[in-house]
Amino acid sequence: MGDVTTATHRLPSAGFSITIRVSVRADASAIGRLTTAVGEAGGVVTAVDVVDSDSTAVVVDLTCDTADSAHAEQVVACLEKLDGVDVRKVSDRTFLLHLGGKIEVTPKVALRNRDELSRAYTPGVARVCLAIAENPDDARRLTIKRNTVAVVTDGSAVLGLGNIGPAAAMPVMEGKAALFKRFGGVDAWPVALDTQDTEEIISIVRAIAPAYGGINLEDIAAPRCFEIEERLREMLDIPVFHDDQHGTAICVLAALTNALRVVGKSMGDIRVVVSGAGAAGTAIIKLLLRQGVGDVIATDRPGALHRGMTGLTGAWPWLVENTNKAGYTGDLKGALRGADVFIGVSAPNLLTGDDIATMAPDSIVFALANPDPEVDPREAREHAAIVATGRSDQPNQINNVLAFPGVFRGMLDAQAREFTEAMAVAAAQAIADSVGEDKLNPSVIVPSVFDARVAPAVAAAVRAAAKGPHLDSTVDGEPSSAPSPVERV
């Protein structure tokens, strides 16, 4: 197949899954020739379905994972070069999944007759409105505020794609809302704002807050995200949680807790190098320092952040004063020499396996840039004791879905008015403990994102950390000791 089988350094994944409908001559080797061609092109066949056949030909839907759009085209080109093969249609399964969006609103009440309509809407609803007007806190019990979160973005820092705007950010926000529901039972809704002005964002979120029990800030660029979160936390009586900061930090702390258990090192003795001193990197560093990590070197485009640097903005002045004890002034690769832990929340392909080889024995590598990590995990595993990425097709996936559904479930159940550091630490410990010491090994330092025990464990830990007066007894998130709506109205 010659030049068509150009190799890609990226790993095939379900994110670039395609289904190719092909007609092939009916003979004993027909299917084998198709799957072999896909494999030689670097694709991974995940399903083969026979759609139709006659005495001369077979029509097959061939589903395969590819590395990116260009790679998908290469796979198709390989099939088109085969004798007796007619490629009829190529479907991108990710785009098909997004047709019409990924979430919807479903009423909780049936509205089957006039009586039900009278209670759900006029005239009965007026009594509930008056009860809330008399006691605004009743909105947490008698409206969707009890279980609803706004997922707010301005589209300025979407995944690894950068400033692509609010409309292009919507598929991510919809996905986030779907994850909230699937893993935490939380009703979440995208709020994509057509402004990147700090004051406007704060004003808008403050204005819409009465309808929500929590605010999840998402994909807002640093350093603006820090001010937005801080000021909204001061203004609002509901939790404000920037997932790119706190969700990532919680998951990293959980993974590092278990990784250190595996390699037999303690938090206070290790040196950590963090690549990327933006929202996620800063939050990770702050949480690790509060947990007593030995030392952290933060690196970004200028190299290692160190005392004496000028023109610093955002969180960088704080970082230069609280990290890099030895005053290292070089680049990322130099900072790695002798380090125990590398945490990457930056950009792809910054390092090679040779760079990882310079780290301390039993090193730990968390290369979390998505979709392509800072170092090829296959190369990193040749030298590091433990390797984790953000990818679902690699062992040790560090994914924020381990944290935010349970964190918000716990805060909503506790009717919390703020997100606290104690909640973050409790959530991280709950995630780490979900693995179980008897299950820990270099390939299993975090639970699966589909582990049904994780979100309830995180929620329970967050509720306990909230220490609300209504935590004495709860059933399905409803405080049993609180007055009922009937008693209140």
Image (spheres, rainbow, N blue to C red):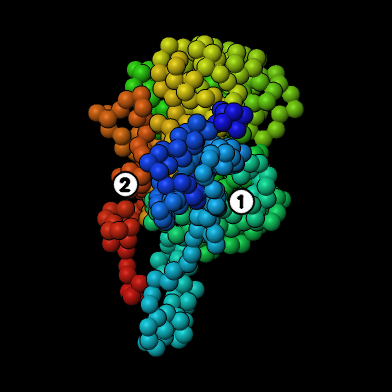
Whether 300 is drawn above or below 93: the answer is above
Q: Amino acid at mark 2?
A: Ala
Whether residue 195 is visible:
yes
Is residue 448 toward the left or the right of residue 293 in the image? left
Q: Position of residue 435 (x, y in %)?
A: 31, 34
Near-viewer residue (306 or 156)? 156
Near-viewer residue (462 or 15)? 15
Is residue 462 toward the left or the right of residue 165 in the image? left
| Residue name at image x 44 percent, y 25 percent | 387
Q: Position of residue 51 (x, y in %)?
A: 42, 55
The residue carrying mark 2 is 452
Whether 146 is drawn above or below 464: the answer is below
Whether residue 6 is visible:
no
Is residue 80 toward the left or the right of residue 404 in the image? right
Q: Position of residue 36 (x, y in %)?
A: 45, 34
| Residue name at image x 43 percent, y 11 percent | 361
Which element is circle 2 on?
A: loop
| Residue name at image x 57 percent, y 42 percent | 80
CA–CA distance between discs 2 and 1? 28 Å
The residue carrying mark 1 is 169
| Residue name at image x 40 percent, y 53 percent | 55
Which of disc 1 and disc 2 is earlier in sequence? 1
